[in-house]
Image: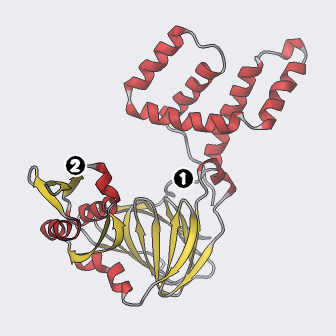
Amino acid sequence: MAERRTPTKAEREASGWIVRIKAHDASDRDRQDFQAWLDADPEHARAYAHMERTWSVVASLQHLKGSAAANERAPRHRRWLSPALAIAASACLAIGGLYWFTRTPAPTGVHYATAPAEVRTIELADGSTIVLSGATEASVSLREAERRVTLGQGYALFDVRHDPARPFIVETPQGDIRVLGTSFVIRVGETQVRTTVIRGSVSGAAERPGLLRVLGSGEPVTAQANEEIILNEQGASVVTIAAEIIPRRLAWQNNMLAFDGETLNEAIAEVSQQTGWQFELADPDLGQMRVGGYVHADPEAFIDLMSSSLGLEARREGERRVVLSRRS
C-alpha cells in the first residue's frame, strides 16, 4: 500500500538549489554558496544527486513544457514567473508528489534489531513467527487488512499463520514477497533478494527502478516448495533447487556459513553479521570473486576457507579487523 515518504532536510534544501542553479543564470556568489553547502555535509551531495536525477526526468516531460507555454500566453499581470522558473516550480511540485506516492522504507509498527552473531525469534500476535539472523533489522506492522514486515538486510525465517483476510507482505530493497500462510526464508544480499520456499507457495514482485516506482511493482512470479524467487534489478525470476539445499539456506541458525557462489563482498557481509568481525579487501576488485563452502561461523574458519579456495591471505589489524589480499 502506498504511503507518504517525507523528504529529508537535505533533500528539501537540494530542491531549492536545483531551482536556484538551474532555473536562471546563477551568479558567481550563487555557485560559491552552493559549493559551500555541498562541502558542509556528505549527505548534501547525495541528496543533490538524487534530486538532480529526478529533475532531469521531470523537466523532460511534455506537460511541463506545456505549462511553461501556457504561462507565456497568460495575461501580463499574471506572468509572475519566467518560463524557466515555471518549469522549475512544476518540477518541484512533481518531485514533492513523487515523495507522497512512494512507499516508506518501513511501516509504522514495532522495530526489531539483532546484534552480530545473535539469532532471535519473534512471536507475532497473529501466531506467526520470525527468526532473525545476526545484525538484522525488521519492522513489523499488523493491521486489520494486512500484515507487513520491512527487512533491510540479513536473513529471516518466516512461519506465517494462514489468514485469507490478511495477506502477509515482506518489503525488501528489491521488491515485495506476498503470502497467505507458509514457511520461507529470505536473504537480503548486496545486489539481490533470495526467497527460499520451505512449505506452501510464495509470490514476489521486483521493485521498478527510479521514478517508475510510482507505477507499482513489476509482474509477480510464484514459487512452491523447493523453489526460490530471485529479486534484482532485472526483475523477478523463479529457480528450482534440490531438497538438500534447504538445510544450507538455514545454516545460519546453527552458527554455520554456507556459500553457493556468492560474491566475496556478499560473503564478507554475511560473516560480519554472524561474527561481528570486520573484513576488508586490499583490492576492491577481489569483491567480485565467487565463494563456495560450508564452514562454522568462526572468523578463523572463514579465513582458512579464503586461503584454500581463493588463494587469499589475511592480515590482522586490531582485535577484530582483518584485511584480505592476494597471496604474494
Report x, y in % for residue 101. Answer: 65, 49
Q: Is residue 320 left or right of residue 262?
A: left
Q: Which residue is at 42% across, 62% downward? A: 110
Q: How many marks?
A: 2
Look at the image and tell me whether residue 320 can be seen: no
Secondary element under disc 2, as helix, strand or loop, is: loop
Report x, y in % for residue 247. Answer: 33, 85
Q: Which residue is at 51% across, 35% downward? A: 49
| Label ID, residue 282 | 2
Secondary element under disc 1, as helix, strand or loop, is: loop
**Around disc 2, counting alpha carbons within 10 Å, would you say few (fewer than 14), some (14 to 19), or many (20 or more)?**
some
Q: Which residue is at 64% across, 64% downward? A: 218
**Around disc 1, counting alpha carbons within 10 Å, would you say few (fewer than 14), some (14 to 19), or many (20 or more)?**
some
Instruction: Indicate which disc, 2 or 1, sits on the residue closer to the N terminus.
Output: 1
Q: Which residue is at 24% across, 52% downward? A: 281
Look at the image and tell me whether residue 84 can be seen: yes
Q: Is residue 222 left or right of residue 196?
A: right
Q: Is residue 247 left or right of residue 315?
A: right
Report x, y in % for residue 34. Answer: 49, 19
Quadrant where the image shows the C terminus: bottom left
Q: Is residue 326 left or right of residue 107?
A: left
Residue type pointed to by label 2: Ala
Above or below for 166 versus 317: below
The residue tagged 1 is 104
> Please, which residue is most extreme toward the bottom here?
243
In the image shown, does 132 or 129 lie closer to the viewer?
Answer: 132
